Amino acid sequence: MLGKTMKRFHKQAGAAVVEGGFAVQLDGRGIKSPAGRRLEVPSHKLALAIAAEWDAQVDEIKPHTMPLTQLASTALDRVGPERAAIIEQLLAYAGTDLLCYRAESPSDLVDMQTKSWQPLLDWAATHLDAALVTTTALMAVDQPPQALAALSAKLASYDVWRLTVAQAACAASGSLVLALALVEGRVDGETCFAASNVDEAHQIALWGDDAEAADRRERLRRDILAAAEMLALLG
């Protein structure tokens, strides 16, 4: 249903209690994900927020303006059925985690990275038992097996909805540590995006910005904020 833009066909969206959760409905009838699964979520607030996205559509239904609907569909169609593969993909980010690859110069960029990233790596070491290695080299470094095992265990502890939040935030930020910090409440959405954007912010300060790069950053920012919003609505 959400693959392409289509004409609005419903009068009103809402949410209804169903066994095990809450269904998003259009004119009193349940709707389905692109893969044909019933669009049902575990939180009434989340169901109402998704319904609000449908009600906000005017003449046409534009999926790119419905991030919560898309995230819920991803949870149902991809993350749930492919849980083990999703965790494996997320763990792959640990080997190239943005926060672990530091600049040697200039000093102001080094300071920006240290100030923004090191507290999060310290948090991961203390609260997740995942002490990751940092480097200034271009080649990927091997992370300690104990740290990877701890990260895997944390991801495995999440339900499908929080794993979806982690997957979305990790893909947008380039950092598994940032994604876990978001899910665990260590950072909010704006802080997560700002930390992922340190290098770009430094470049903009030096050379200015361009429209294409600004559009890309805004898309990533929206993805992270949508993940943070879904997390908040899960309760």
Image (cartoon, rainbow, N blue to C red):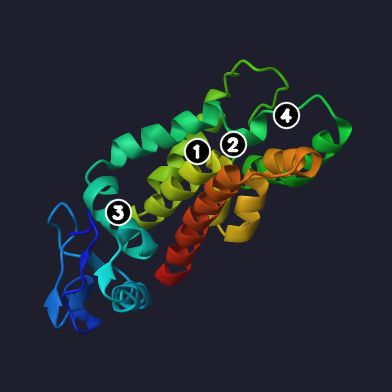
Residue topped by disc 3:
75
* Quadrant of the rendered image containing residue 7: bottom left
Q: Is residue 125 above or below residue 58?
A: above
Residue type indicated by callout 4: Arg
Crowding at dot 2, Cα within 10 Å, few <14 / some 14-19 / many 20+, comes out as: many
State the mark number for residue 151. Answer: 1
Position in image of residue 196 (x %, y %):
62, 44
* Label 2 element class: loop
* Label 4 element class: loop
Residue topped by disc 4:
102
State which tag comes first along the sequence, 1 or 3.
3
Inter-mark Cα distance, 4 to 2: 18 Å
Residue located at (59% from left, 36% from top): 130
User: Which of the two discs, 4 and 2, sits closer to the camera?
Assistant: 4
Residue located at (58% from left, 24% from top): 144
Task: Locate the C terminus by quadrant.
Answer: bottom left
Residue located at (24% from left, 55% from top): 76
Residue topped by disc 2:
130
In this orientation, does residue 23 appear? yes
Residue type indicated by callout 1: Leu
Inter-mark Cα distance, 1 to 4: 21 Å
Contact between marks 2 and 3 (CB within 8 A): the answer is no
Q: Is residue 44 above or below residue 202?
A: below
Crowding at dot 4, Cα within 10 Å, few <14 / some 14-19 / many 20+, comes out as: some
Position in image of residue 108 (x %, y %):
86, 37
State which tag comes first along the sequence, 2 or 3.
3
Contact between marks 2 and 1 (CB within 8 A): the answer is yes
* Label 1 element class: helix
Position in image of residue 104 (x %, y %):
80, 24
Residue type indicated by callout 3: Ala
